[in-house]
């Protein structure tokens, strides 16, 4: 019996996608497109609007570990966080094959679906690793606030790192690209990743501006002029990260004294 080709419309969440997988298997339907409510494009295929069902989502999620192992479950989870075009379709193809072939599927590196998703997940993990060193926090009224502009949804991967690094701090990390924030406060399970429509850090205080100038002075002071290599720096610190990094920003506050951009570090 052939499966009917449809276009799935869902809320864009991971649980919503898993609900689509459940409904498609129950109704023997093959999704060829995935749409979100804000997508205005029309489809030539019958439209099925799938309501997110947490029970169905949990059932599908647990089945991944049973059918094609913990690695398959993790690949689906992390694959959904990537910026891979048509990621839902690639994940659907992986799930279909995983149910049929089992754990051996992920060892088949010649399979185009596995290859495409492995590369996308690697880029996600690499970007998250880069941000563990490139995030810059500012003190805003006793709360550490930082902003990033990632290509992938890296907040879930950054959460263990920063929550472990600042367990006693109140901090907030804003993802401009995906309009999400990671919130943390001291205590067990004192974190959450939430959507946010409009976010602004607000003006920095005088003490914060002073610390920013100190950091920029330190950054320029430790540089060795004779070994300046812009291409090497852009290899290890790509330009797309610079806009959110304090050492590459300039403050327009003339009330604070200028700090030297080069020269020896003053003795303490």
Image (spheres, grey):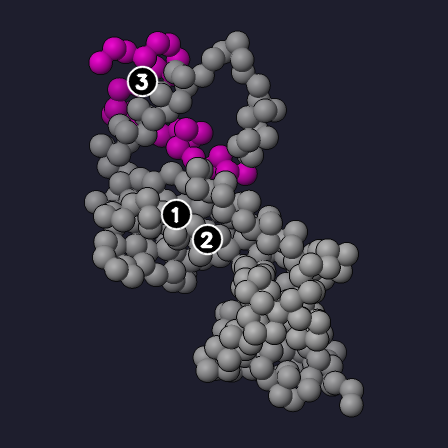
Q: Position of residue 218 (x, y in %)?
A: 35, 21
Mark nearer the N terminus (2 vs 3): 2
Main SS of the magenta segment? loop
The boundaries of the magenta stretch are 240-268
Q: CA distance from mark 3 to mark 1?
A: 32 Å
Image quadrant in which the C terminus is located: top left
* Element under disc 1: helix
Q: Which residue is mark 2?
A: 157
- Considering only vertical position in the picture, is 216 above or below 33? above
- Along the viewing direction, whichever of 3 and 63 lies nearer the viewer: 63
Disc count in the image? 3
Q: Is residue 124 visible?
A: yes
Q: Of tags 3 and 1, which is closer to the observer?
A: 1
Q: Residue at x 49, y 47 (%)?
A: 128
Tag of residue 100: none
Q: Residue at x 66, y 51 (%)?
A: 119
Q: Position of residue 219 (x, y in %)?
A: 40, 22
Q: CA distance from mark 2 to mark 1?
A: 8 Å
Q: Which residue is mark 3?
A: 259
Q: Is residue 38 visible?
A: no
Say whether residue 265 is magenta. yes
Q: Which residue is mark 1?
A: 161
| Residue 70 occupies quadrant | bottom right
Q: Is residue 28 left or right of residue 149?
A: right
Image quadrant in which the N terminus is located: bottom right
């Amino acid at each position: 019996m052939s499966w009917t080709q449809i276009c799935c419309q869902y809320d864009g969440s991971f649980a919503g996608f898993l609900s689509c997988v459940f409904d498609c298997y129950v109704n023997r339907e093959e999704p060829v497109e995935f749409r979100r409510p804000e997508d205005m494009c029309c489809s030539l295929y019958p439209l099925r609007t799938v309501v997110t069902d947490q029970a169905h989502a949990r059932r599908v999620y647990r089945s991944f570990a049973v059918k094609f192992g913990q690695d398959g479950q993790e690949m689906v989870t992390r694959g959904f966080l990537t910026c891979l075009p048509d990621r839902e379709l690639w994940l659907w193809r992986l799930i279909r094959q995983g149910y049929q072939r089992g754990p051996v599927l992920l060892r088949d590196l010649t399979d185009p679906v596995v290859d495409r998703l492995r590369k996308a997940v690697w880029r996600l993990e690499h970007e998250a690793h880069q941000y563990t060193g490139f995030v810059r926090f500012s003190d805003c009224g006793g709360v550490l606030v930082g902003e990033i502009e990632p290509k992938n949804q890296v907040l879930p991967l950054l959460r263990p790192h920063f929550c472990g690094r600042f367990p006693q701090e109140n901090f907030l990390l804003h993802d401009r690209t995906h309009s999400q924030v990671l919130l943390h406060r001291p205590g067990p399970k004192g974190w959450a990743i939430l959507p946010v429509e409009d976010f602004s850090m607000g003006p920095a205080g005088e003490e914060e501006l002073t610390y920013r100038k100190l950091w920029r002075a330190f950054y320029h002071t430790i540089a060795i002029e004779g070994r300046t290599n812009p291409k090497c720096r852009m290899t290890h610190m790509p330009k797309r990260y610079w806009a959110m990094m304090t050492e590459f920003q300039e403050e327009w506050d003339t009330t604070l004294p200028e700090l030297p951009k080069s020269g020896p570090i003053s003795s303490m």
